[in-house]
Image: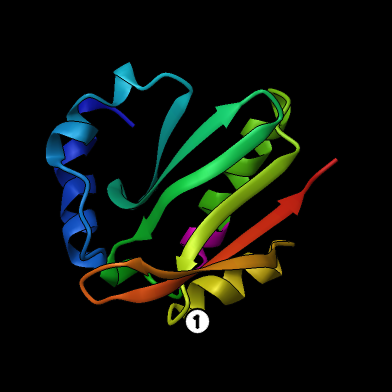
């Protein structure tokens, strides 16, 4: 991600999530300790983004979103696969995330990439209130 990507990333954020990170969070992406910010492009346009936090051999997928016009085209899968590969190259072995229990497309993608359900958090999300599904996978 670079400075020019921030407005496009934030537009995807607003269209995807009800609990938003501030635009300032993305503007300060270079300051995140242990955090990495990635974008995927399609025809030169920001199509998706992913934010991860890596500490030693653990990598949490904090955010991943695909812009509406780019969904169901494999961009999210390619982005997440690339991000996990890069994190693996720097020692990550355990990947984990949480996802709204109603987000069946995302859950299907995560399962396809080797994630399994490891737990749930009741009423984790707000706007609307919804449970979170905890998922993780181990890569060698």
Q: In the rendering, at what x and y percent does residue 99 appear?
A: 47, 66
Seen in the picture, residue 86 relative to 103 is either above or below; the reply is: above
Front-most of 137 and 49?
Answer: 137
Q: Is residue 110 left or right of residue 44?
A: right
Q: Residues within 10 Å of mark 1 (few under 14, many from 20)?
A: few
Q: Is residue 31 left or right of residue 136?
A: left
- The span picked out in magenta is 73-77
Seen in the picture, residue 16 relative to 92 is either above or below; the reply is: below
In magenta stretch: residue 76 = yes
Front-most of 57 and 6?
Answer: 57
Identity of the residue furthest to the front in this view: 122
Identify the residue at image location x=14%, y=40%.
23
User: Colour scheme used in the picture?
Assistant: rainbow
Identify the residue at image location x=80%, y=45%.
139
Q: Quadrant location of residue 19?
A: bottom left
Question: Dot 1: what SS?
Answer: helix
Identify the residue at image location x=60%, y=76%.
108
Residue under label 1, please give it: 104
Q: Is residue 80 left or right of residue 125?
A: right
Q: In the rendering, at what x and y percent does residue 118 appear?
A: 69, 64
Seen in the picture, residue 25 relative to 66 is either above or below; the reply is: above
Q: Is residue 32 left or right of residue 8?
A: right
Q: In the rendering, at what x and y percent does residue 32 appear?
A: 36, 22
Front-most of 8 and 101?
Answer: 101
In magenta stretch: residue 102 = no
Q: How many marks are shown on the rendered structure?
A: 1
The C terminus: image quadrant: top right
Q: In the rendering, at what x and y percent does residue 49 appear?
A: 37, 48
Identify the residue at image location x=20%, y=72%.
127
Q: Quadrant location of residue 116?
A: bottom right
Magenta span dominant secondary structure? helix
């Amino acid at each position: 991600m670079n400075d020019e990507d921030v407005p496009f990333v934030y537009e995807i954020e607003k269209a995807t999530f009800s609990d938003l990170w501030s635009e300032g969070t993305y503007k300060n992406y270079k300051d995140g300790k242990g955090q990495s910010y990635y974008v995927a492009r399609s025809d030169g346009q920001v199509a998706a983004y992913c934010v991860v936090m890596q500490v030693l051999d653990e990598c949490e997928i904090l955010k991943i979103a695909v812009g509406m016009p780019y969904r169901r085209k494999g961009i999210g899968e390619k982005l997440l696969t690339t991000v996990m590969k890069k994190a693996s190259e720097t020692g990550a072995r355990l990947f984990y995330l949480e996802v709204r229990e109603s987000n069946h497309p995302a859950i299907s993608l995560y399962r396809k990439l080797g994630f399994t359900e490891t737990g749930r958090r009741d009423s984790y999300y707000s706007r609307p209130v919804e449970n979170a599904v905890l998922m993780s996978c181990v890569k060698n």
